[in-house]
Structure formats: C-alpha cells, structure tokens
C-alpha cells in the first residue's frame, strides 16, 4: 500500500490550521501541524513531509526565515513550500520567491484552490526529481563518452607513433633490396610488393589520424598554387605497377593549369580514389581520370568499369568502415577508411564529393571552389 502524502501545515492561527487540516485530510493527505517556526523546523527534521504549507507572518520567526532554514536541511531543497499570507503585494511575493518558495497563496484561502495548489506543487516536485534522474543519466553518459574519447586519442597516439615507424622501416628496407642488382627477379618482385603494401599501410595510418582530426574539427587545408598535371601524374606513376598487376589501364585527361589546393591532402585524396578504382576494376578494363577547372571550380573524377555502388548505399559510402559487398568482387570500400578520408579532405577545402553511376562501374566526383 503506498505511503500517504504528508503535508506540514505551519500557522500560528488555530482556525487557519483547522481549515487546512480538515480540507487536506478529506482529500486523503496525512497532515502534520506546527504552531510556529521552531516547531516547524523540528517537525521537518523528524518527519520529512512531502509538502509544506507555511504562513508568512508569525511571532518570533517569520515564514521566510523558516523556509530558508528548512532549505538548508537534508531533503529541504527539494520539498515544495507554499506560502500563505494576507498581504497581497509585489514585495511580499518577491520575498517569498527569494526565500525559496514554490507557490504563493493569499488569505482567505478557498479549500478547492488549496488542494489544487498542493497537487500542482507535488507534481512539479516529481517532475524535478525525474529531471534530476535524467540529468544524472546524461552526466554518466557524458562521462562515458569522454572516457571513450580519451581512449580513442590514446589509440591514435599508438597507431601513429608505434606503428608508423616500423612500417616506414619496412619501406626503407624494401627500397634497399630494390637497389641490389644481384637479386633474382622473383626477389625483386617480392621487394616491390613489400614496398607497395608498406606505403599503402602508411597511408591507412595517416588517414586514420586525419579522420580523427576532422572529427575533432582540427583538420584544416593549407592551399598553395599547384601544377595539377604534375601532381596527378606523380600519383599515377606510384600506382602504375598496381594497375599493371591487375591488367588495368589508366586513362588520363587533365587540363594544364594551376589550382589552389593543399598538396598533401589532395595527393592522398587522388591516391585513395584512383587506388580504389583500380581495386574494383575488372581485368583488361580502363580506369578513367579527368581533371579540369570550370566556372571557378576544380572538378576531378575517377571512374572504373566494375560493379558500381548501389543507389541506396551512395549516401553512406563515405562513412567510416561502411562496406558494399558483392558476391563476386571485393568490398567496394576496401578497409573502410580511404573514402572517409577523401570526404574529410575535400570538406576541409570547402568542397563536395559524391559517387554516381558510370554505366558500368562507379564514378567518384569532387568539386572544390577556387
């Protein structure tokens, strides 16, 4: 059986106390009576009522002082206090609010109004309690998110510092082997593959770091005037061996012009997009690369002749670790980070990137204002 709601009635006038007691008991409330301030504080400490009906003008200690003392007690801050007074003026109302009152009733009090006000005060108390619970839950969730963020930053530091260095060492050793003219062709081929994969792993590590920076709002571009054809030809030269090993031709159409771009971010963006196209292009097919400036915008596209990207996945293809699976080809996004990095790098330039149907295959297009 639920515990009855207890109301503490504090008033030095016996008739007022009796009226409040009879009214509230008829509504099912349990009523405590106090004739003055000291008695009210003692009753609150002993019984911790659910609501307080408090007269303002009393001998010895007025209602405002009593309210302040109760608010300082355990659970006093959350207990509704309704002031009763015969003074109907703004100053008294303001004093009641400053003292911590939740409501304000003027005498003579109508019994029906008294019940409604107490019901409203109790509902507000319950609502505040629920809000406090929600706040505490939100605070716990915030702390958990902060802890995850700190763990993520620690992981980023591990990835960049503890993995990048040994991968770079692998690349250097592979280069040393490639300079050894006494190696057999098979060994030279293996060294070439080692260097290619080491460089790819390095790009993945740096992509992961930059994606983390972008999520924190700290990835920015530093544009300089670049010879576009030279930049893209460097990327194509690095990926040419990969394309030949897959029997994929690279078709390049680039206008001769300079553009204002961040060289490092865009070199890695071009590399990710072209490498992605090579990986998903069928054997003996062509990957087409186009670059031009039109109407004050730099336009770049890479198209393959593979299976393409389903329309319902095109808005998600740039999300981290999202993969489009086909039964007979590899996942479209590979490791799930390259395209995400491309999105962040293009956005850092104030541009846009998307994927469309190449009929057949997929065409990745980016535009950056100049």
Image (cartoon, rainbow, N blue to C red):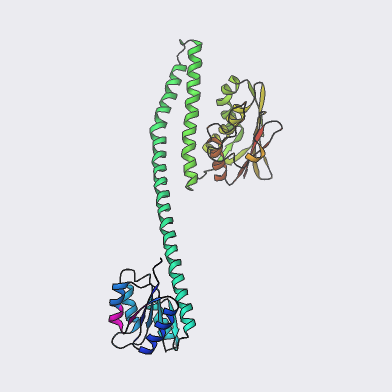
Q: Residue at x 40, y 74 (%)?
A: 80
Q: Is 57 one of the magenta-colored residues? A: no
In the displayed orientation, state which residue is furthest to the front: 1
Q: Which residues are magenta?
A: 31-40
Q: Is residue 181 above or below residue 57?
A: above
Q: Is 34 one of the magenta-colored residues? A: yes
| Residue 292 visible within the image | no
Q: Residue at x 38, y 86 (%)?
A: 18
Q: Which of 358 and 257 lies nearest the eye of the viewer?
A: 358
Q: How many marks?
A: 0
Q: Residue at x 38, y 89 (%)?
A: 15
**Image coords of residue 217 (percent x, y):** 49, 48
Query: Which quadrant holds the N terminus?
Result: bottom left
Q: Which of 249 and 325 lies nearest the eye of the viewer?
A: 325
Q: Which of 227 and 363 lies nearest the eye of the viewer?
A: 363
**Image coords of residue 305 (percent x, y):** 67, 28
**Image coords of residue 352 (percent x, y):** 61, 44
Please indicate whether residue 244 sits to the left or right of residue 15 in the image: right
**Image coords of residue 172 (percent x, y):** 43, 23
């Amino acid at each position: 059986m639920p515990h009855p709601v207890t109301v503490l009635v504090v008033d030095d006038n016996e008739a007022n106390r009796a009226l409040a007691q009879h009214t509230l008991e008829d509504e099912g409330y349990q009523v405590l009576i106090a004739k003055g301030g000291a008695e009210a504080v003692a009753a609150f400490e002993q019984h911790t009522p659910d609501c307080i009906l408090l007269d303002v003008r009393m001998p010895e200690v007025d209602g405002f002082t009593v309210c302040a003392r109760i608010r300082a007690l355990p659970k006093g801050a959350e207990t509704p206090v309704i002031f009763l007074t015969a003074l109907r003026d703004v100053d008294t109302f303001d004093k009641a609010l400053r003292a911590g009152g939740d409501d304000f009733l003027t005498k003579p009090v109508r019994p029906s109004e008294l019940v409604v006000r107490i019901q409203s005060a109790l509902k507000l108390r319950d609502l505040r309690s629920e809000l406090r619970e929600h706040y505490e839950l939100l605070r716990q969730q915030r702390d958990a998110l902060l802890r995850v963020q700190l763990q993520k930053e620690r992981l980023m530091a591990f990835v960049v510092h503890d993995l990048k260095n040994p991968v770079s060492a692998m690349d250097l050793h592979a280069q040393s082997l490639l300079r050894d003219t006494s190696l057999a062709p098979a060994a030279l081929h293996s060294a070439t593959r080692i260097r290619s994969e080491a460089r790819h792993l390095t790009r993945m590590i740096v992509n992961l770091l930059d994606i983390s920076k972008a999520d924190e709002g700290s990835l920015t571009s530093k544009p300089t005037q670049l010879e576009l054809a030279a930049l893209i030809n460097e990327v194509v030269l690095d990926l040419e061996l990969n394309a030949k090993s897959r029997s994929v031709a690279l078709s390049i159409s680039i206008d001769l012009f300079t553009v204002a771009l961040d060289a490092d971010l865009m070199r890695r963006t071009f590399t990710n997009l072209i490498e992605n196209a090579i990986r998903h292009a069928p054997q003996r097919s062509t990957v087409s690369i186009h670059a031009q400036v039109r109407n004050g915008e730099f336009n770049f596209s890479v198209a393959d002749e593979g299976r393409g990207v389903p329309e319902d996945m095109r808005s998600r293809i740039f999300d981290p670790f999202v993969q489009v699976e086909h039964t007979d080809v590899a996942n479209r996004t590979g490791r799930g980070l390259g395209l995400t990095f491309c999105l962040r790098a293009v956005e850092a330039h104030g541009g846009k990137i998307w994927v469309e149907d190449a009929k057949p295959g997929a065409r990745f297009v980016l535009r950056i204002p100049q």
